[in-house]
Image: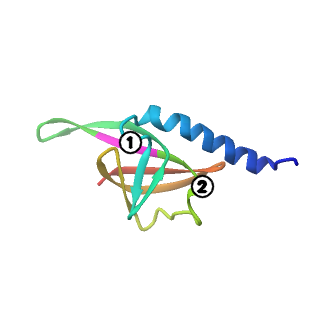
Amino acid sequence: PLMSLANQLAQAAAQAQRGLAPLADPDDDGVFTIGADDYTGVLNLRTVEMRPGPNGLERIEELEIVATRAQWDTAHEAAPRFGVTALGRDWWCIKVSPAGPCWSLTCVAA
């Protein structure tokens, strides 16, 4: 039987996530938590700005999580902000974007 393009994309995204998540986050293999539920995604931590602070330069970081949609029944809404725990830290999700068979969650430090 022929697979639909959407199913093929979803399977490819899940396979890519399984391979990339441990590379991006070797300690937890891409695991992040929303509420009491654990999910798996590819975590991309980046510095978006350096600004003067009371003790020198302060690094402003942003975390993008790309995770397969199949992990959720419905899409998350970024408003109101919801808490995410990843990389051993607490974050606020400020944006949720569709990215093919995945969701992209943009988070800032809590």
Q: Which residues are magenta?
A: 60-64
- Residue at position x 48%, y 55% from top? 95
Q: Is residue 4 above or below residue 29?
A: below
Instruction: Nearest to the eye among marks 1 and 2: give it.
Output: 1
Q: Quadrant of residue 83 in the image? A: bottom left
Q: How is the image coloured?
A: rainbow
Amino acid residing under circle 1: Asp
Q: Nearer the viewer, residue 61 or 17?
A: 17
Q: Secondary structure at mark 2?
A: helix
Residue 63 is a magenta residue: yes
Q: Is residue 4 above or below residue 17?
A: below
Residue at the limit of the structure toward the front, as seen here: 1
Where residue 69 is drawn, which disc sits there?
2
Image side of residue 96 versus residue 27, left or right: right
Amino acid residing under circle 2: Arg
The crowd level at tag 2 (other Cα within 10 Å; few <14, some 14-19, many 20+) is some
Q: Is residue 35 above or below residue 95?
A: below
The image shows a total of numbered marks equal to 2
Q: Position of residue 74 (x, y in %)?
A: 58, 66
Q: Quadrant of residue 34 in the image? A: bottom left
- Residue at position x 47%, y 62% from top? 78
The crowd level at tag 1 (other Cα within 10 Å; few <14, some 14-19, many 20+) is some
Quarter the C terminus occupies: bottom left
Where residue 28 is drawn, which disc sits there?
1
Query: Which SS type dominates the magenta stretch?
Result: strand
Where residue 63 is drawn, which disc sits there?
none
Image side of residue 80 versus residue 104, left or right: left
Q: Position of residue 94 (x, y in %)?
A: 42, 56
Residue 88 is a magenta residue: no
Image side of residue 87 versus residue 71, left or right: left
Mark 1 vs mark 2: which is more N-terminal?
Answer: 1
Q: Position of residue 54 (x, y in %)?
A: 12, 41
